[in-house]
Image (spheres, helix red, strand yellow):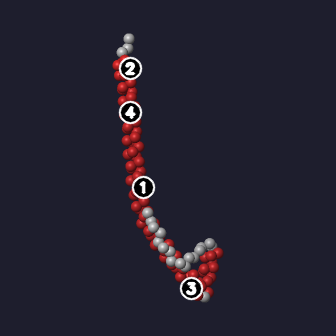
Amino acid sequence: MPRPDDARNDLFLPMLLMATALVGWFGMQAYALAGDRKQLTAIMTTQETQVAAALKIRTSLDSLAADTQRLANAGNVNARVIVEELRRRGVTINTEPKVAAATR
């Protein structure tokens, strides 16, 4: 006749293996996610310089377009042709200075 302690001992090893496998799985996932986070942080740092350069170019192009619009408003024929061609292509020129948007 089996004793009650035998049933408890029969389940101990499988439950221990299951718990060890589960902890190992969570550990592996945490390690992989930490590596992914490190890679994404490195990529984001690399892109920050590119975004800053693009913003600088965008600011200078906006300034150039605004100056061209002001020349067209003052009566310059060549500037008027450029502004009309840009408008035809869907480019909107804002002559008001922009306030820099806050970045993250």
Q: Are marks 4 and 3 in contact (CB under 8 Å)?
A: no
Specify which label sits upstream in the sequence, 2 or 3: 2
Q: Is residue 48 above or below residue 93?
A: above
Check disc 2 and report its element: helix, strand or loop. helix
| Residue type for callout 2 | Ala
Residue at position x 48%, y 73% from top?
99
Check disc 1 and report its element: helix, strand or loop. helix
Check disc 3 and report its element: helix, strand or loop. helix
Specify which label sits upstream in the sequence, 2 or 4: 2
The Cα–Cα distance between marks 1 and 4, rounded to whole angstroms, is 31 Å
| Residue type for callout 4 | Ala
| Residue type for callout 3 | Leu
| Residue type for callout 1 | Leu
Q: Which residue is mark 1?
A: 40
- The mark found on residue 19 in the picture is 4
Specify which label sits upstream in the sequence, 1 or 3: 1
Q: Is residue 100 visible?
A: yes
Give x and y (percent) for residue 68: 56, 82
Quarter of the C terminus within the rendering: bottom left
Mark 1 or 4: the one toward you? 4
Specify which label sits upstream in the sequence, 2 or 1: 2
Is disc 1 surrounded by few (<14), some (14 to 19) or many (20+) residues within 10 Å?
few
Residue at position x 52%, y 76% from top?
62
Is disc 4 surrounded by few (<14), some (14 to 19) or many (20+) residues within 10 Å?
few
Give x and y (percent) for residue 15: 39, 29
Q: Which residue is mark 2?
A: 7
The Cα–Cα distance between marks 1 and 3, rounded to whole angstroms, is 45 Å
